[in-house]
């Protein structure tokens, strides 16, 4: 799951980061890797990729701050 | 140039296509010029600057894009080379304002899209201050792109200056995005995204009309209104944006959501529409590379939400937050289309631009607006977070087709009031405070209402006229004429007689009369003795008459001989004046020494009530006096005024003609109604040509609009009672002599006859209805929202009335009085009447009437509560449920006010013959309240709330309503002739000789047409009212035969 997310971010969103590793505890929004558009696109990707739905009330920074946060959130579903 | 062969034709992106179309539609307009003036504080090396710019063009392919049209399809090409000689201008001898003007002028420059899409100049303002003027067509740039270009230019300048050009790195090319977008459009995985957007806009019905203004023409011209939010507001906004329950993914998104919420609430408050859509640009730079590419990426998608009066700002924000998240999820490059672009005419853009330093020079930027925007957009709202100053600005670009200068001056006040409400308490209702500007507020409240104004007695003024002009004609009715002195004596004698009969001040006396001299004498006598008159027209059905007598607690009823028989089971003594005339004539002729107190009642007038019973409106002497003395001045009533009394005495519109001439020495000509029930006496006014002033309703006017009345004596026409169409007013204006003055007078019975008035002006009144004008003396009219806030001019709201003309309330209906007459929140000590009418202020400051907010309808000027009819229908044992609707015909033109009819829908045990329903209803309701058609349904359609769904009923086909009288065909030639004419006029295929004219849908207009056709065919002069008296072919035919025989025998 982690790798899928890292790959997605590297390829789709931040093509410039492709050769460097994104840390699983890197603040995605805070570091500027993603902006709000990128975040919502990633959620859209997650929903399709893992066949889950992210309800509006779950769309908070606490669930999506880092790749770790996202994995925790998704495993709780 | 010889490399042309290698140049590739590229498609336009969706955004480019939309811009290209917009430019093609407005070829002369600089609407897509994106202009910046960057101030650079230092001494710029011009040669270095020129070199840097040449490199910028070489490195950035967006600047080398050019556009062609091939077989009507636009294509773009990227030129491999573009030599641009950047101009240097030394303006150091010019004043600051001259430079500003020059920049503004220069920003209007048109581009030849096939050669070069930018204009770049370096200007010396003074030593140490240069301006880089950069104007780029929106086809190849956007706001982010400007920031990128500025940064690149700074970098190139520095490198050339420092002579390390080798280290210039290549910047990403716009062409990559063009190709990326094209792939997206055709990608299968984006089908669900298209579907999402399609569904999103499918539910949108109509675009809201900002301030009630329609787009009357198309223009790209727009004024920019800049609202600097200042330090305090900006800080509050940022602070609020940090709160956990408000926060979105990023602070920028949070601020965007907050402004979107404010904009939605603002639009709701200046349109009243609930379902709203705003267009917002998606930056469309998903990858880091794209974030560094100059070019146009942004693409507009709609944000749609519902706003309700019950919402708080916080609730709106929560919905907007959800909506923008979905927006971000689905805003995919290339997914916009024309139908999405047409779903909004307001846009919101949040621009965070940072042009910090240029090489080592401090810099700042100015965005120059060209005063042109996309003609599809009515309002563009841009939130500008410029140069990290910490202070936000709101730029409102106002399309001139919607916003006139007058309005654009007030708009910032409205917008800021919404914003301040949001900042003050995000949990407060969005409609807690008014957003009207101070000038709008004051316009409603001036001149001030004052409690103590001088009261002038109507009767004393009349008696004064008697003293000065005793022998002047006061009343003419057929062959009867009365001078002021004669009229006064008769009124005094009747008053004295009534006092002897035990009548006191404040007693109520019903006047159940035809329109005749006795009615006028009765009115004056009752006022003279300090009593309260209750007028009841002859056309009122007996049950209603008896109800009014009982309900009003009348001490006495003065009735015409023929009408006395209608009064049954009543404890109220009845006096037929003619039977006691001898005694009356013996009474004192002198004026009575009784004073009329201003707060005492003058009359009680009954109007349709929603409970099935009419309600009595209590009008004080003060209210009557306020109206009449205002009207005397306004209509310039003099001793030369001759009024026609030709409308129902049960109608408060008639009060004008009843009293007004007597205050100035003028006279009244009375036109009595016949017993047929169809009151068409006013038509005789034009044949007689005795009067110069007439008051009537638009429905009346529609009945004589086609006549040539150029030579008529009428100089003043006062129109009231219902919506007055401009078409009709225009036709009438030309039927009469050119100096005819037409006044439109508005006023419910509860505010005494008329309280808002205006003169019709053919030149300025070009909407569908004649405006109702402005409030009369000592009266205020307010247009309020559901929270009783004054609305900004142009916005539709509920009309409330306050001031000296207001009724004291309803007789014995304390609850209803309490609900309708509320405390005036603007002027202490006054009540305010809720009319239930909708209104707005037009561009000229006039009130415009826009219909009802409830179940009241008007036919022929008569005010009818549909629930009044429904309650009476429910009295039938076999009827379980019912609904009455006013159906407006579509065949006739707008001029025809008569083309409306009431239709009763009901369910119950079984269908009841329409005739039977009509006969029963006629006992309780006046003719104009009896439905023309009835429709029996097994079940009435219901709304979610369990109420009858009137919208669905309106959609039912009621044209095929069966004629329920047994069909009997014509007996002879006369029957046939009449039948042919009736069929023609009533548009029916078959009519039996026993079918009733009224039941067939016949009205006054139809009667006029039928009568004139018959008279034409037979060379006769049959009076109009006969068709009402003999309403079947059989009876009418028998009558015609009789007349023909008589004529032969002569």
Image (tube, coloured by chain):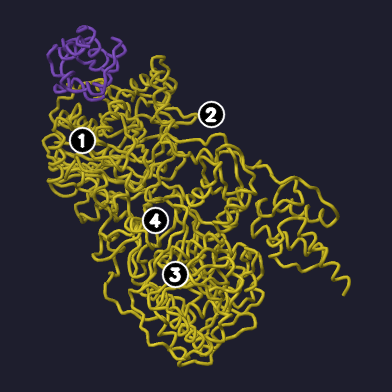
Chain colours: A purple, B yellow
- Residue B653 seen in the current view: yes
Camera-side mark, 3 or 1: 3
> In the picture, residue B580 is in which quadrant?
bottom right
Q: Which mark is residue B607?
A: none
Q: Where does residue B232 sit, x and y in percent of width and height?
A: 12, 46
- Rendered residue at 37%/23% (across/down): B178
Q: Earlier in the sequence, mark 2 or mark 1?
A: 2
Same subunit, labels 3 and 1: the answer reads: yes
User: Which chain is indicated by disc 4?
Assistant: B
User: Which chain is indicated by disc 3?
Assistant: B
| Residue receiving disc 4 | B840
Camera-side mark, 3 or 2: 3
Q: Where does residue B307 sit, x and y in percent of width and height?
A: 32, 39
- Rendered residue at 27%/63% (across/down): B442
Q: Which mark is residue B255?
A: 1
Q: CA distance from mark 3 to mark 1?
A: 68 Å
Q: Earlier in the sequence, mark 2 or mark 4?
A: 2
Q: Does residue B239 appear left or right of residue B267 in this picture?
A: left
Q: Which mark is residue B71?
A: 2
Same subunit, labels 2 and 1: the answer reads: yes
Mark 4 closeness class: few <14, some 14–19, many ≥20 residues within 10 Å:
many
Camera-side mark, 2 or 4: 4
Q: CA distance from mark 2 to mark 4?
A: 50 Å
**What element does badge 3 sit on?**
loop
**What element does badge 4 sit on?**
strand
Q: Which mark is residue B554?
A: 3
Q: CA distance from mark 4 to mark 3?
A: 40 Å
């Amino acid at each position: 799951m982690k790798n899928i997310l890292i790959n997605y971010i590297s390829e789709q969103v931040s093509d410039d980061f492709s050769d460097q590793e994104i840390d699983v505890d890197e603040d995605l929004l805070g570091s500027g890797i993603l902006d709000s558009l990128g975040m919502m696109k990633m959620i859209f990707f997650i929903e399709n990729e893992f066949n889950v739905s992210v309800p509006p009330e779950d769309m908070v920074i606490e669930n999506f701050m880092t790749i770790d946060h996202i994995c925790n959130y998704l495993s709780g579903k | 140039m010889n490399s042309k062969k290698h140049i590739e034709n590229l498609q336009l992106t969706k955004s480019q296509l939309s811009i290209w179309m917009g430019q093609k539609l407005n070829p002369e307009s600089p609407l897509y010029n994106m202009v910046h003036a960057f101030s650079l504080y230092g001494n710029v090396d011009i040669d270095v600057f020129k070199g840097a710019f040449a490199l910028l063009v070489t490195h950035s392919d967006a600047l080398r894009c050019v556009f062609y049209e091939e077989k009507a399809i636009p294509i773009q090409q990227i030129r491999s080379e573009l030599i641009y000689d950047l101009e240097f201008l030394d303006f150091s001898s010019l004043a600051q304002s001259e430079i500003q003007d020059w920049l503004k002028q220069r920003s209007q420059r048109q581009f030849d899209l096939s050669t070069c899409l930018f204009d770049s100049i370096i200007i010396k303002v003074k030593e140490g201050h240069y301006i880089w003027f950069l104007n780029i067509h929106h086809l190849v740039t956007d706001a982010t792109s400007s920031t990128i270009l500025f940064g690149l230019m700074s970098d190139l300048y520095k490198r050339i200056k420092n002579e390390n050009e080798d280290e210039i790195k290549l910047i990403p090319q716009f062409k990559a995005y063009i190709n990326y977008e094209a792939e997206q459009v055709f990608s299968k995985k984006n089908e669900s995204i298209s579907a999402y957007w399609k569904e999103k806009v499918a539910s949108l019905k109509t675009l809201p009309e900002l301030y009630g203004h329609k787009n009357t023409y198309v223009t790209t011209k727009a004024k920019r209104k800049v609202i600097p939010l200042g330090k305090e507001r900006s800080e509050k906004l940022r602070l609020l944006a940090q709160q956990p329950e408000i926060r979105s993914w990023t602070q920028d998104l949070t601020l965007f959501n907050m402004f979107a919420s404010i904009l939605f609430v603002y639009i709701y408050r200046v349109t009243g529409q609930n379902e709203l859509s705003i267009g917002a640009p998606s930056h469309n730079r998903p990858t880091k590379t794209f974030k560094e590419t100059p070019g146009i990426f942004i693409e507009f998608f709609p944000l749609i939400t519902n706003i309700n009066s019950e919402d708080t700002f916080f609730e709106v924000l929560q919905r907007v937050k959800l909506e923008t998240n979905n927006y971000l999820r689905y805003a995919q490059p290339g997914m916009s289309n024309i139908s999405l672009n047409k779903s909004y005419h307001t846009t919101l853009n949040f621009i965070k631009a940072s042009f910090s330093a240029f090489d080592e020079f401090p810099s700042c930027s100015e965005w120059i607006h060209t005063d042109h925007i996309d003609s599809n957009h009515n309002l563009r709202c841009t939130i500008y977070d410029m140069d990290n100053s910490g202070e936000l600005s709101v730029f409102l670009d106002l399309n001139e087709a919607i916003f006139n200068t007058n309005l654009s001056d007030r708009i910032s006040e409205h917008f800021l009031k919404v914003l301040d409400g949001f900042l003050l308490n995000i949990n407060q209702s969005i409609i807690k405070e008014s957003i009207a500007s101070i000038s709008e507020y004051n316009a409603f409240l001036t001149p001030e209402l004052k409690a103590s104004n001088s009261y002038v007695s109507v009767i004393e003024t009349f008696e004064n006229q008697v003293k000065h002009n005793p022998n002047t004609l006061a009343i003419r009715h057929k062959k009867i004429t009365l001078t002021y002195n004669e009229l006064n004596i008769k009124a005094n004698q009747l008053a004295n007689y009534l006092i002897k009969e035990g009548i006191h001040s404040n007693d109520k006396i019903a006047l159940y009369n035809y329109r005749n001299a006795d009615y006028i004498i009765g009115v004056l006598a009752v006022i003279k003795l300090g009593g309260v008159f209750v007028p009841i027209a002859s056309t009122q059905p007996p049950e209603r008459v008896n109800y009014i007598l009982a309900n009003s607690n009348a001490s006495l009823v003065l009735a015409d001989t023929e009408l006395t028989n209608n009064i049954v089971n009543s404890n109220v003594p009845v006096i037929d004046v003619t039977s006691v005339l001898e005694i009356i004539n013996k009474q004192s002729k002198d004026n009575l020494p009784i004073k009329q107190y201003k707060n005492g009642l003058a009359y009680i007038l009954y109007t349709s009530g929603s409970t099935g019973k009419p309600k009595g409106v209590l009008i004080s002497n003060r209210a009557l006096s306020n109206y009449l003395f205002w009207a005397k001045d306004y209509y310039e009533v003099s001793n030369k005024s001759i009024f026609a009394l030709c409308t129902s005495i049960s109608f408060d519109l008639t009060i004008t003609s009843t009293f007004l001439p007597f205050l100035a020495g003028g006279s009244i000509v009375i036109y009595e109604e016949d017993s047929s029930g169809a009151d068409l006496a006013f038509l005789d006014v034009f044949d007689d040509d005795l009067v110069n002033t007439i008051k009537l309703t638009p429905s009346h006017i529609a009945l004589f609009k086609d006549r040539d009345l150029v030579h008529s004596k009428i100089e003043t026409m006062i129109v009231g009672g219902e919506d007055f169409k401009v078409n009709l007013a225009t036709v009438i204006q030309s039927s009469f002599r050119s100096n005819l003055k037409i006044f439109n007078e508005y006023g419910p019975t509860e505010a005494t006859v008329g309280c808002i008035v205006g003169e019709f002006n053919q030149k300025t009144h070009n909407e569908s209805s004649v405006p109702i004008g402005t409030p009369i003396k000592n009266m205020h009219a307010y247009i309020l929202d559901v929270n009783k806030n004054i609305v900004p001019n142009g916005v539709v709201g509920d009309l409330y009335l306050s001031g000296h003309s207001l009724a004291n309330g309803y007789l014995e209906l304390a609850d209803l009085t309490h609900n309708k007459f509320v405390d005036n929140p603007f002027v202490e000590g006054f009540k305010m009447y809720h009319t239930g009418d909708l209104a707005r202020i037009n561009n000229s400051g006039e009130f415009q009437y826009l219909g009802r907010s409830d179940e009241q309808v008007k036919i022929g000027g008569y005010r009818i509560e549909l629930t009044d009819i429904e309650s009476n229908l429910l009295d039938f044992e076999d009827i379980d449920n019912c609904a009455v609707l006013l159906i407006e015909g579509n065949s006739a033109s707008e001029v025809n006010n008569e083309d409306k009819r009431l239709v009763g829908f009901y369910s119950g045990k079984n269908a009841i013959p329409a005739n039977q329903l009509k006969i029963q209803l006629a006992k309780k309701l006046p003719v104009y309240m009896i439905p023309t058609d009835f429709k029996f349904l097994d079940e009435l359609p219901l709304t979610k709330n369990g109420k009858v769904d009137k919208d669905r009923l309106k959609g039912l086909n009621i044209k095929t309503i069966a004629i329920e009288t047994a069909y009997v065909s014509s007996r002879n030639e006369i029957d046939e002739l009449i039948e042919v004419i009736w069929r023609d006029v009533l548009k029916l295929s078959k009519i039996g000789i026993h079918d009733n004219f009224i039941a067939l849908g016949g009205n006054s207009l139809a009667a006029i047409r039928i009568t004139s056709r018959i008279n034409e065919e037979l060379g006769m002069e049959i009076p109009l009212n006969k068709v009402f008296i003999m309403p079947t072919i059989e009876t009418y035919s028998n009558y015609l035969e009789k007349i023909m025989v008589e004529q032969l025998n002569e």
